[in-house]
């Protein structure tokens, strides 16, 4: 399991997470500091998270986690 912390500051970054995660074969999830977890491929799931603090992107495939992380950073 690999995790990457990231600060999400706008809806475009949330959209980038969903778009990048949709390209992944493995499950990618996002967890907020309150402990809520959402499937990174679900825009509705992500909208229920608290992005006022950094969130964690995690999954079993390090390359795919890095792919989603990089999509947020651009």
Image (spheres, rainbow, N blue to C red):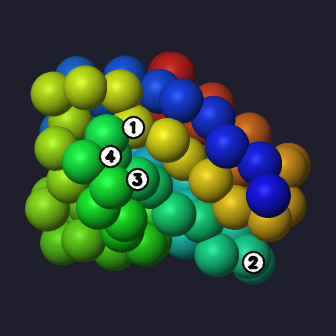
51 lies left or right of 28: left
The quarter of the displayed image where residue 61 is located = bottom right
26 lies left or right of 31: right
Picture coordinates of residue 47 (x, y %)?
15, 58
The disc, 2 or 4, on the residue closer to the chain's N-terminal end is: 2
Work out how far the residue at label 2 is from the one at label 4, CA to CA, in angstroms: 23 Å
Q: Residue at x 37, y 65 (%)?
A: 37
Q: Which marked residue is nearer to the observer: mark 3 or mark 2?
A: 3
Q: Is residue 63 above or below residue 11?
A: below
26 lies left or right of 8: right
Q: Which residue is mark 2?
A: 25
The disc, 1 or 3, on the residue closer to the chain's N-terminal end is: 3
Asked if marks 2 and 4 touch (Cβ < 8 Å), the reply is: no
- At label 4, counting other C-alpha atoms closer than 10 Å, the crowd grade (few under 14, some 14-19, many 20 or more) is many
Work out whether residue 54 or residue 14 is closer to the camera in this orientation and state it: 54
Q: Residue at x 14, y 62 (%)?
A: 48
The disc, 1 or 2, on the residue closer to the chain's N-terminal end is: 2
Asked if marks 1 and 4 touch (Cβ < 8 Å), the reply is: yes
Picture coordinates of residue 26 (x, y %)?
74, 76
The disc, 1 or 4, on the residue closer to the chain's N-terminal end is: 4
- At label 2, counting other C-alpha atoms closer than 10 Å, the crowd grade (few under 14, some 14-19, many 20 or more) is few
Q: Which residue is mark 1?
A: 55
Asked if marks 1 and 3 touch (Cβ < 8 Å), the reply is: yes
Q: Which mark is residue 31?
A: 3
Q: Which mark is residue 32?
A: 4
């Amino acid at each position: 399991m690999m995790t990457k912390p990231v600060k999400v500051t706008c809806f475009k970054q949330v959209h980038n997470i969903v778009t990048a995660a949709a390209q992944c074969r493995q499950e990618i999830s996002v967890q907020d500091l309150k402990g809520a977890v959402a499937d990174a491929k679900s825009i509705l799931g992500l909208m229920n998270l608290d992005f006022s603090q950094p969130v964690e992107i995690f999954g079993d495939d390090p390359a795919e986690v890095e792919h989603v992380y990089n999509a947020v950073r651009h």
